[in-house]
């Protein structure tokens, strides 16, 4: 399908870099928990504590690292952070106690957070405003394709169940980041943005952008829904077969890979981004209602409701992704894209850290009422993002067009 391939040039190179490390990440995600318990020998509670601390550190470090990408140049910063991430993954091969695990995990999470911000700044410097959301859609499709391939490799390692198989997966992930760094070096350099020495991080004083980030974090609760909320719901509250957990994951990644680019085509400015986010919120409310129905009925009826809900969920995800990307870029001041993207990315960490606690309490504890409350919360946040984005646009030091179909129009 031609629309799956990004245009030749920087967009395709960025997608290749994304693909190279997402294959390794896919294998890592499906094997890491068992690796740290069976090979490293850590208790599950200590693994959870260590990863929570690590991602908290990484989310804080992402903002100054994004600013560093603006000041020193995003390409060089992204290459170095990809190398550091690869070395952090490689260190897991020899870690055998909790404190070394915690140190390696903190380096890994910090480098990953900074790399995400630097990549966004690099994309902003290489891709025109009107093409950025489409470029990000291609990157998301590539990410899902790589994760699917990597998850298959990880599944083979799980089937083998040997220490050598687990070590091979981590070695593949480490090498994948080295390949990512090599691909990123092929991109044109983006000139660094000069700034005052010791200047404060502007994003930390930008209240409108902080509110946009907070509301977007509510919409990001869909992330632990697929990885934790649904598996627990299926096994604890429905009669559906457990293998459906894997099938729904494949459905999600495959749909995003095939249709994310198409879903993003209608988003080309703040008004259309707000419309996509409202659509996402409405779909999420419907999704939650359908998932709640899966607790009633036969195994096949429950499975049908879960599949229908998963189709709605992936549609909500794609509209949310397109709308949030547009807002994150359009509201970032010129010369501070890395800094602002680093801050916006903290929403992912917060959703992944606090989301499991919230979803477990709502879905497993409250059942149908919890599903409906979750859907209503996401719907309210999605409708609030439009007026908050317009408020944020009105406070920008550079003019942002919010009334027409064109993307951001900044003054010289």
Image (spheres, helix red, strand yellow):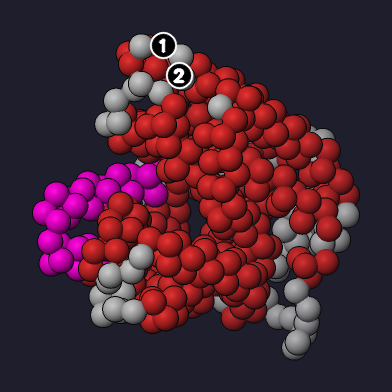
The disc placed on residue 219 is: none
Q: How far apart in space, not on screen, are marks 2 and 1 (Cα)?
A: 7 Å
Corner quadrant of residue 386: top right
Residue at image position (41%, 11%) is: 297
Tell me the residue at 57%/72% (across/down).
57
Which sits in the foreground, 309 or 197? 309
Is there CB contact under 8 Å for labels 2 and 1? Answer: yes
227, above or below 289, in the image: below
Q: Which residue is mark 2?
A: 294
**Residue that numbered label 1 is attached to:** 297
Viewer-proximal residue among 40 and 224: 40
Q: Nearer the viewer, residue 109 or 41?
A: 41
Residue 3 visible here? no
On the question of residue 349 being in view, the answer is yes
| Element assignment for label 1 | loop
Which segment is the magenta one?
A: 141-170
- Place residue 365 in its image quadrant: top right
């Amino acid at each position: 399908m031609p629309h799956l391939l990004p245009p030749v040039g920087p967009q395709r190179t960025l997608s290749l870099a994304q693909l190279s490390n997402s294959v390794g990440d896919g294998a890592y995600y499906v094997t890491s928990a068992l690796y740290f318990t069976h090979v490293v020998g850590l208790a599950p509670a200590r693994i959870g504590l260590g990863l929570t601390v690590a991602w908290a550190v990484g989310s804080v470090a992402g903002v100054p690292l994004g600013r560093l990408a603006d000041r020193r140049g995003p390409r060089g910063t992204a290459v170095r952070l990809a190398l550091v991430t690869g070395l952090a993954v490689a260190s897991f091969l020899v870690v055998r106690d909790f404190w070394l695990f915690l140190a390696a995990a903190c380096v890994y999470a910090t480098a990953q957070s900074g790399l995400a911000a630097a990549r966004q700044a690099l994309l902003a410097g290489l891709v025109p405003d009107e093409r950025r959301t489409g470029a990000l859609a291609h990157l998301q499709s590539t990410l899902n394709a790589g994760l699917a391939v990597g998850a298959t490799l990880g599944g083979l390692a799980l089937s083998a169940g040997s220490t050598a198989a687990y070590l091979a997966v981590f070695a593949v992930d480490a090498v994948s980041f080295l390949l990512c760094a090599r691909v990123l070096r092929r991109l044109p350099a983006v000139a660094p943005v000069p700034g005052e020495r010791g200047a404060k991080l502007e994003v930390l004083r930008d209240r409108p952008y902080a509110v946009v980030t907070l509301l977007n974090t509510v919409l990001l609760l869909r992330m632990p829904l697929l990885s934790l909320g649904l598996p627990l719901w299926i096994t604890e509250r429905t009669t559906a077969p457990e293998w459906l957990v894997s099938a729904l994951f494949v459905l999600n990644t495959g749909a995003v890979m095939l249709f994310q680019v198409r879903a993003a085509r209608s988003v080309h400015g703040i008004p259309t981004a707000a419309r996509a986010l409202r659509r996402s919120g409405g779909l999420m409310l419907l999704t939650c209602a359908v998932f709640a129905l899966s607790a009633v009925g036969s195994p096949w009826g429950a499975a049908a409701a879960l599949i229908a809900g998963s189709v709605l969920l992936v549609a909500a995800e794609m509209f949310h992704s397109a709308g949030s990307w547009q807002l994150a870029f359009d509201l970032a001041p010129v010369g501070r894209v890395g800094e602002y993207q680093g801050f916006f990315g903290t929403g992912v960490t917060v959703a992944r850290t606090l989301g499991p606690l919230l979803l477990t309490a709502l879905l497993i504890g409250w059942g149908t009422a919890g599903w409906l409350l979750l859907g209503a919360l996401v719907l309210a946040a999605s409708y609030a993002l439009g007026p908050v984005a317009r408020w944020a646009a009105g406070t920008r030091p550079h003019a942002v067009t919010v009334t027409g179909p064109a993307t951001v129009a900044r003054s010289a």
